[in-house]
Image: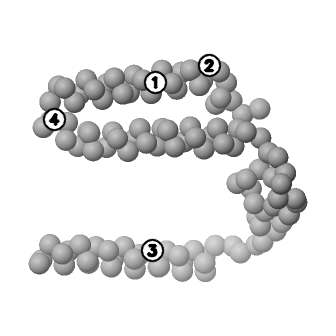
Amino acid sequence: MIEYLYIFLFILLSIMISFIVFILSYFLASQVYDSEKLSAYECGFQPFEDARNRFDIKFYLVAILFIIFDLEVSYLFPWGFYLNSLGYFSFWWMMAFLILLTIGFVYEWMKGALNWD
């Protein structure tokens, strides 16, 4: 049971530190609001227009590329952690996976999918 106590204390300490940092940032940071700060800068268009407006396909493309390479990293962490016990078979399969992803990345790069005009 002592192992669970350590986990509980770690979670409790992390929650306390999060709240302390949040409260300190509220009091120590400058709170100047302007139209630029309150705008929806993530989406690339004004949110107070017609909801059926068309926008550039590059937003979707960037999201899909992020998901693909984010999944690559999620496969690499557990594989790297257990690499010594998995052997050469697992090593070469992961190398084939990385080569395939690298070929896809180079293809996207050459097609200009990563250029933001």
Amino acid type at mark 2: Met
Q: Which residue is mark 4?
A: 86
Amino acid type at mark 4: Leu
The image quadrant that residue 89 belongs to is top left
Residue 45, position as x, y percentages in the image: 81, 52
Q: CA distance from mark 3 to mark 1?
A: 38 Å
**Is label 3 or label 4 in front?**
4
Q: CA distance from mark 3 to mark 4?
A: 38 Å
In contact (CB < 8 Å): disc 1 and disc 2: no
Residue 18 has which mark? Answer: 3
Q: Which residue is mark 2?
A: 110
Amino acid type at mark 1: Thr
Q: CA distance from mark 1 to mark 2?
A: 12 Å
Report crowding for label 3: few under 14, some 14 to 19, many 20 or more residues within 10 A (C-alpha).
few
Q: Is residue 34 visible?
A: yes
Asked whether 31 or 82 is in front, the reply is: 82
Give the mark nearest the N terminus, 3 or 2.
Answer: 3
Residue under the point 72% across and 34% down: 116
In contact (CB < 8 Å): disc 3 and disc 1: no
Helix, strand or loop status at disc 2? helix
Report crowding for label 2: few under 14, some 14 to 19, many 20 or more residues within 10 A (C-alpha).
few
The image quadrant that residue 74 belongs to is top left
Give the mark nearest the N terminus, 1 or 2.
Answer: 1
Residue 102 has which mark? Answer: 1
Q: Is residue 32 left or right of residue 3?
A: right
Q: CA distance from mark 2 to mark 4?
A: 35 Å
In contact (CB < 8 Å): disc 2 and disc 4: no
Helix, strand or loop status at disc 4? helix
Q: Is residue 102 left or right of residue 8?
A: right
Residue 28, position as x, y percentages in the image: 60, 76
